[in-house]
Amino acid sequence: MRALAVAWEPDWAIATADGLWEQLSNRGRLGTFVGWMTYLSRQRGELPALPEPVRVKPVDDKGSLIILTPERLTPSNPEHVALAHYIQQVLGERGLLKRVVERRPAPT
């Protein structure tokens, strides 16, 4: 994830387990969400302090890599899902999870 962020300088990127998105999404609504590893560019804003076991690692001067759990995150683990929900809520309240691309209205 770090190499991806340095090479491509995305606004947001994730690496996560299959099935987590379904548990975190709001009835299938597409948008930016957290994963096991989430990269947020510095342009999105300053990250708040996050609770253990979450780790935040700077990626040069480009942004931050958020790692939710030291072990592989699994959507079948209720503690992992609860932590992901909580971190998503905290980051969302800070405006850090805005959509990467705004949805356009359907043509009429």
Image (tube, grey):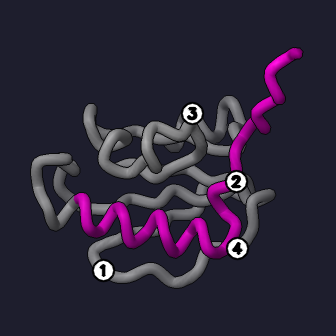
Q: Position of residue 17 (x, y in %)?
A: 27, 38
Position of 19 compared to 14: left or right? left
Q: Which residue is nearer to you in this view: 106 or 25?
A: 106
Label 1, on which residue?
52
Question: Is residue 37 at all visible to an observer of this figure?
Answer: no
- Distance, label 4 to label 3, CA atoms, is 20 Å
Q: Are marks 4 and 3 in contact (CB under 8 Å)?
A: no
Q: Are marks 4 and 2 in contact (CB under 8 Å)?
A: no
Which comes sooner in the sequence, label 2 or label 3? Answer: 3
Q: Are marks 4 and 1 in contact (CB under 8 Å)?
A: no
Question: Is residue 40 at all visible to an observer of this figure?
Answer: yes
Label 3, on which residue?
4
Which comes sooner in the sequence, label 4 or label 3? Answer: 3
Circle 4 — which element? loop
Which comes sooner in the sequence, label 1 or label 2? Answer: 1
Q: How many marks?
A: 4
Does the magenta run of residues contain 96? yes
- Distance, label 2 to label 3, CA atoms, is 20 Å
Which comes sooner in the sequence, label 1 or label 3? Answer: 3
Label 4, on which residue?
46
Range of residues picked out in magenta: 81-108
Q: From this view, report whether residue 2 is shown above or below residue 106.
A: below
Look at 53% across and 40% down and name the residue there: 29
